[in-house]
Amino acid sequence: MFEEICIEFIIAGVSSFALTAILSRCIIPILRAKKAGQPIRAEGPKSHYSKAGTPTMGGIAFIMAIAIVLMGMTLWYAFAKKQSELIPMALTMALAVMNGMIGFVDDYKKLVKKQNEGLKAKQKFLLQLVAAIAYVVLLKLVGHVNTTLHIPFTEINVELGIVYYIFSVILIVGIVNSVNLTDGLDGLASTVTLVVSGFFAAVALTTLNASLSLISAVVIGAMLGFLIYNHHPAKVFMGDTGSLFLGGAVVGAAFLINEPMIILIAGGIYVFETLTVMLQVFSFKTFHKRIFKCAPFHHHLEQCGWSEVKIVSVFSIITALLCAVAWFGL
């Protein structure tokens, strides 16, 4: 069983890497032709002005690659009459794709249709709520989750009842948007998500979780393939299309092992980035003072003179350490 899952993991990961690299190369010229270039915020770091016009919505490439690979693996499991094992994977990918579609509509309206607002914040939030609620309910219907919440690093399991669903929906929407906020530097969200997916891959292979193994494999492969074009200086950005998709994938991975809270540790960088934005907004509105030079925190470090490569490297190392800590919290 272990050897079989490892072989499938390698096949899925390598296929996702190759397809993402190929599709990205094909899609970048199309995005340029559509003038789907990245707008730069006036209040952002001045060093980002040179990025103006860089094609975005590149997440389309790795979403397509992941979908193709997982459909192929599903057919393989169906041939072996084991397709029922992949129901949790299918639901998690549906969550990721739904969030990716929300990001796509937002990107398309802003970048292609030149509608500055894109989707309004309330519209995005409502759609994300619908996706999260549907995911949690369907997981419950297929018997993959219960309403008991494990507290990491303890043997404590708390029965939450209906509160579990409320907590889960808030967690899902929160992490999805946190990954989106982390996507602000060349290769940052890609690299951090690569490390987080590596953590879930280790969990999947040690627990023989086929669904989680395949999801981890395709995300790892996709991030490696995308980083060929997304590393500094980036030739393409993933856009909300890609970052919201990845947010759905990583938070869904935590639910596949019935350890939703573990994403708060393994994905600590996502959470921290969001907290810095919340603190900045609260401080400015309440005291008319800014805590950071710019938020999220990666922009603050840029303003302090850190290079993008240094920030991505440090955040990735911190994520690896957080994942090691999370391992002992399971």
Image: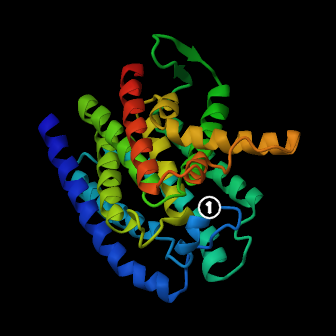
- Is residue 162 in view? no
Q: State the image quarter where residue 206 is shown.
A: top left
In this figure, which colouring scheme has been used for the structure? Answer: rainbow
Q: State the image quarter where residue 198 is shown.
A: top left
Q: Quick one: label 1, few (<14), some, or many (20+) residues within 10 Å?
A: some
Left or right relative to 33: residue 287: right
Which residue occupies 28% across, 74% down? 22
Which residue occupies 24% across, 51% down? 77
Left or right relative to 176: residue 195: left
- Residue found farthest to the left: 3
Residue 322 in the image: state x and y as whole percent.
42, 31
Nearer the observer, 2 or 240: 240
Q: Is residue 282 above or below residue 18?
A: above
Nearer the observer, 249 or 180: 180
Q: Is residue 292 above or below residue 56?
A: above
Quick one: SS at disc 1?
loop
Nearer the observer, 299 or 63: 299
Residue 268 in the image: state x and y as whole percent.
51, 35
Image quadrant holding the N terminus, namely top left
Image quadrant holding the C terminus, namely top left
Residue 299 in the image: state x and y as whole percent.
59, 52
Q: Say which amino acid is labelled 1.
A: Pro
Q: Is residue 97 above or below residue 319?
A: below
Residue 136 in the image: state x and y as whole percent.
56, 40
Left or right relative to 47: residue 238: left
Which residue in the protein does label 1 denote? 45
